[in-house]
Amino acid sequence: MKLSKLFAVLSSAAVLSSTVVFSGSAFAADDSVSTEGSSSMEQVIGVLGEAFMEAHDDISFTYNPTGSGAGINAVAEGRCDIGLSSRDLTEAEKQNLKGDVVAIDGIVVVVNPQNKVKNLSLAQIKDIYTGKITTWKDVGGEDHPIVLIGREAGSGTRDGFESVTGTSDQCKYRQELTSTGDVITTVGQNVNAIGYASLSALSDKVHAVTVDNVIASEATILDGSYQLQRPFLLVTPKDKPLEGAAKIFMDFALSPEQADLVEGAGVVPMAK
């Protein structure tokens, strides 16, 4: 089976608590790269992992989508080679870890396609999620209660969203879901729901509202006019340089030659 087909099968079949393995062959530990963390980075780490395996068919590559916090802990505890985080490292985490930015991701605010609301200001988004605005009528929609959907504590997407909107520890979530895909599905099934997700995860199941009349795109993310954005980090130990296969992958992922792959995954590459 071709690697691209193998990844497609694994991506569609694997639940987010499973490890996606980009090779079924047996490899020695020195010939493998293990990554763990942000589920929002699934698309970008997927295309990079696939391309890496095509270029290095003697090295195996695995990705375990457990969330940013779990990925940071995993690399800190030596349980994986590279952690994946869709939020900045905290000052405490920076004591022992460093994060290399592989891409910048826009966080989109999503509503059901049947919702008439197409634009929200950053202030309105804050008021919605903190419970000051409770009905769609107050922002130009129908007279129905707003159902707040968000991510679980420790999610990089949640951390990024709450940091930018100034809503940390204030959101009145109806549901806190454990993956980006669950947010998209839930909002797509509830006409009164609102949620947030990575730009790379956007699908026709939902509609992304503009924020202060600015649409999320590569251009608006790079120029800063689209305010809801966060970094995608490859996290490694500060005092233990990568070696062997892990270093080969890191150099590969951060090289300008992979910019088109990263961009194709729906995020803005840092290396060009």
Image: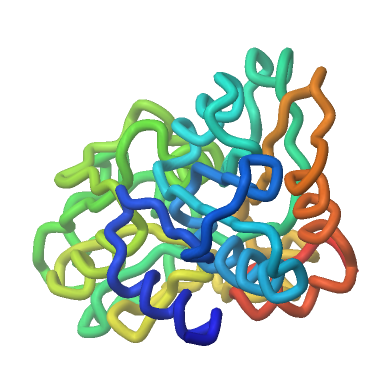
Identify which residue is drawn at 62% across, 45% down: 28
Q: In this view, does 68 lie above or below 260?
A: above
Q: Where is residue 248 in the image (x, y as percent from the top left)?
A: 82, 52
Q: Position of residue 20 (x, y in %)?
A: 43, 59
Residue 185 visible in the displayed image: yes
Vertical placement of 179 versus 136: above or below? above
Judge left or right: residue 5 versus residue 103: left
Q: In this view of the protein, which residue sits in the foreground, 248 or 238?
A: 248
Residue at the spot x=34%, y=86% of the render? 204
Q: Residue 153: which quarter of the image?
A: top left
Q: In the shown orientation, is residue 256 left or right of residue 32?
A: right
207 shown above or below 233: below
Residue 214 showing in the rendered view: no
Residue 151 position in % (x across, y down): 32, 45
Colour scheme: rainbow
- Judged left or right of residue 207, residue 29 is right
Q: Which residue is drawn at 43% across and 30% down?
A: 168
- Which residue is located at x 80 percent, y 22 percent? 240
Q: Which of 101 and 212 is in front in this view?
A: 101
